[in-house]
Structures are given as C-alpha cells and as structure tokens.
Image (tube, grey):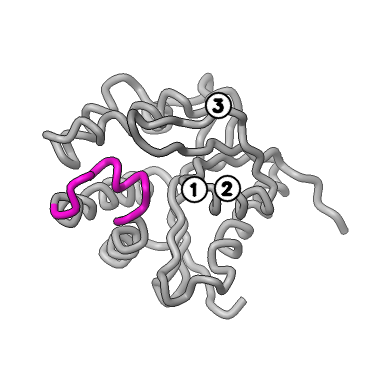
Amino acid sequence: MGVAIRRAGADDREVVVGLLDRVFRNDPVSSWVFPDPDHRLRKHPDLMGAFADQVLAEGWIDMTEDGKSVALWLSMPAAGDATGDAADAHGGDDDPAAFREAVDPANERVEQIARIMGENHPTDRAHAYLLLIAVDADVQGQSRGTELISAVLERCDREGLAAYLEASSERSRGLYERLGYVFTGRTLDLPDGPHMWPMWRDPQARTA
C-alpha cells in the first residue's frame, strides 16, 4: 500500500468533516436529505460533522496519512449486551429527533433517515458497522477504500466478528460484495427518494 493508515483523533475533525462533505454532498442520499442545493451547501457539513462527532466519541475513524481517505466505524454489541451509548447507537425512539435538532431542526428528512437506519439496523449479533467511507476525487481508483475496509475485516475474521453497512449505490454495492458482504434482501427505501442496500458479512475463515 502506498499510503499509511492511522487512527484519527479530535485534531483531525476538520479534515475528516471537510472530506466527508466534499465526497457526499451530491450523493443521492444527501441530495434527498437536502433537496435544495443552496441549503445543502450550508447544512451538509453539519450532518457530516454530527456523524464524525458520534464516531469520534463512540467508535473510531481510520484515515490515510494524507487525509484524503477515511472510514468511520462503530462497534455494535448485540442488543442484549448493549448499554449506554452502545444501546443508543441501535436507534432509540428519541435519538432521531435529537439528531435532527442538532443538525437541521426544520428539516424532517434528517430525522427520517436516522429513524429508518436505526429501525432497520440488525441487533441480534455483535458486529463492526461501517457508517461512512470517503475517498477524495483525486485519489479514487487507487484501491484506497478497499484497503481501509480490508484492514478492519481482517481483524473481524481473526476475532470471529461480523460486519455491516448500508450501500448507497449499486456501484458501491458491487465493491462491498467483492469484500464478502451480502445484500440482506430488502432495501431501505427513503420516502420518494433513493434506496440503500443493507449488507452483512459473516466472519470468514482465514487461509494459510
């Protein structure tokens, strides 16, 4: 690999949020949450900042040394084992409303997407949850995303831990399938909007 991966810290927040904003600003899901382009330009960084803050507090962010690629992960316990912040991450009834209030209080779609993702998140088994992964445009096509994900999946395989994510496009779904993720069979459908593809990966046996 050409660029080293390290764990991001609070000092990296501005870089992480800036990258997430650039990469996802015109993503189908972000465009649905903020249909007005001018409003999206103003508020989309707040949405990405809320995600980054959650993961910095409750999970971890892997990033390349040049700051051009990041992956945001959460460790999700099985529902019966979850307490405190871990339990909230599974999507309690009050969390989507609080998320909306923090990001864009007048925008009900912020709450809707948080609620849909939370209500459909698997809770029966512990897993590593890839919330977001972003690669800057000028380094795409260099296998950055694959390397960031694979580093965690190798650890999941060693520890017998499953993994989960929601793909936001058919193209990304294909990438994740090559890494061993399997579509769960039912899309997450945003009201009058795009689909997301929930994908699960069981731990895989390591070969010598």
In the rendered structure, the answer to whether residue 181 lies left or right of residue 5 reads right
Residue 41, image x and y in percent?
18, 57
| Helix, strand or loop for disc 2 | helix
Which of the two marks, 2 or 3, is nearer to us in this view? 2
- Count residues near mark 2 (Cα–Cα under 10 Å), then give few for <14, some for 14-19, many for 20+: many
What whole-number distance in Å separates the C-alpha atoms at marks 3 and 1? 27 Å
What whole-number distance in Å separates the C-alpha atoms at marks 2 and 3? 25 Å
**Who's the residue at 31% across and 19% down the image?**
93
| Helix, strand or loop for disc 1 | loop
- Count residues near mark 3 (Cα–Cα under 10 Å), then give few for <14, some for 14-19, many for 20+: some
The magenta span reads: 25-38
* Amino acid type shown at disc 3: Ala
Check the image and name the residue furthest to the left.
106
Q: Dot 2 corresponds to which residue?
A: 173
Residue 130, image x and y in percent?
50, 46
Q: Quadrant of the C terminus?
A: bottom right
**Who's the residue at 58% across and 23% down the image?**
124
Residue 205 located within the stretch drawn in magenta: no
Residue 37 located within the stretch drawn in magenta: yes
Residue 78, label in figure: 3
Question: Which one is earlier in the sequence, the residue at label 2 or at label 3?
Answer: 3
Name the foreground residue: 48 vs 154: 48
Question: Which one is earlier in the sequence, the residue at label 3 or at label 1?
Answer: 3
Residue 17, label in figure: none
Residue 24 vertical placement versus 96 (above, below)? below
* Amino acid type shown at disc 1: Ser
Q: Quadrant of the N terminus?
A: bottom right
Q: Dot 1 corresponds to which residue?
A: 169
Which of the two marks, 3 or 1, is nearer to us in this view? 1
Residue 111 vertical placement versus 79 (above, below)? below
* Amino acid type shown at disc 2: Arg
**Who's the residue at 16% across and 40% down the image?**
104
